[in-house]
Amino acid sequence: MSISFRGGFGPQKQDIDLAKYKDRWSDEEIQRHSKRGKFIQFAFLDLKKFGGDIVCEELNNIAIRKDGNRDNVDKDIAYSFERIGWSFDPFPPIVNTSFELQDGRTRTRAAILAGCTFIPVAIFSYPGSDPSVAYVQNLSEALIGNDDLISRPTKEGDLFEAAVAAVTDGGIEHDKTAISDLLLKEFEALRFIKQDQVSDLVDNIFDAVKGGQRAVWNPSRDDVLTYLKECPDLPKDVYFTGKCVNGKRVYVYSSGDTNRGRLWTHISKDVPEDCYVVLYTTDKIPSRIKSRYQDFMSFIEMRYKECFEIVNRTAFAAGINIKIEPPAKRPWKLLGVIPQLNNTTHETLRKAHRLIQVEDC
């Protein structure tokens, strides 16, 4: 006889009664959380089997999340478990009849972080599958398991990650028709995005794969800083941190929209001192990388010129007719960007820890 009640969930020692799931969803609503599985019952998953290891393979959802496991959502949910306890509103994590996770890895990691020893789960039975397609089918189950989930529903970026993984590791042909079929038929993408988004998504997935692997190397910020410390293209007077003594600060940023504002804040505070800039990308689509670097630095240039225009207009309004032009020499120098394409040229440059110029991306 299965256990339907357990006490002592998390720091609050919450009582968990699986009867609270009874009649919460219709049979049809429950089945929406699986493509091939059949719902059996709700139960408890013993978290002690993971031994506190939240980075083990079974808890890794990097293939279906846009940001992999880098976004720290598990820590946010862990805090919620510590403060409030388990919520019966979202559908619980899903396991197979061997109690192996099919969906809900983030909440499971969060529960471990919060010191919990068990969590409620939904058991589904799955038909046996051909090993050659099992990987892609597992991706489908993970994506569809998040349908209707309030906290972390499947989004376009997650479909992108799963499809790229299916092409690089799951035997799906690197062909736009095959990718479209994967999205629409296997992943049931129209659960999560609109029809008019599919074509661009197919193009992006196709572009993100080259020669059977991801087309772009995506390092963490720590990886980039380690790379730069061995880079022969950095001037000898570079300072990464601390007070600059007879040297210049180097600011290292990925080319996201929010980071350009951060960089400008540093540059404007440093004036009249000069600084260096190195950029890298977190974009996974090669065709967008160069233009995003250009847009990033164009924003810095625009803000710099804007400062002089503000002074000129303010002076004119006060009856002072002057026109100050920006100096030809800017108070920053873009040293280069990390060579991140997975091609022969960039891979050779990476081995030597070199930088390239934006126009060479």
Image (cartoon, rainbow, N blue to C red):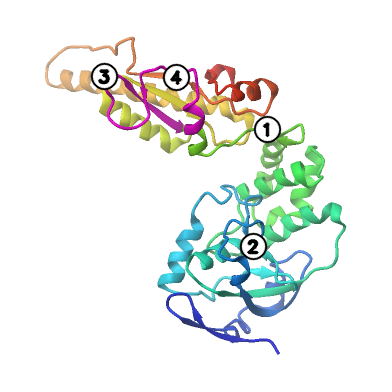
Q: Are marks 3 and 2 in contact (CB under 8 Å)?
A: no
* Residue matched to label 2: 147
Mark closer to the chain start, 4 or 1: 1
In the picture shown, does residue 248 fall above or below 221? above
Image location (x, y in percent) of residue 161: 66, 46
Is residue 255 in view from this perspective? no
* Residue matched to label 3: 308
* Residue matched to label 1: 215
Q: Are marks 4 and 2 in contact (CB under 8 Å)?
A: no
Q: Is residue 101 left or right of residue 352?
A: right
Tell me the mark number nearer the camera, choosing from 4 and 3.
4
Q: Which residue is rendered at x = 69% and y = 67% of the image?
A: 33
Q: Which amino acid is tagged 2?
A: Asp
In the picture shown, does residue 263 fall above or below 248? below
Secondary element at tag 2: loop
Quadrant of residue 124 in the image? bottom right
Q: For this rendering, which residue is in front, 310 or 335?
A: 335
Q: Which mark is residue 234?
A: 4
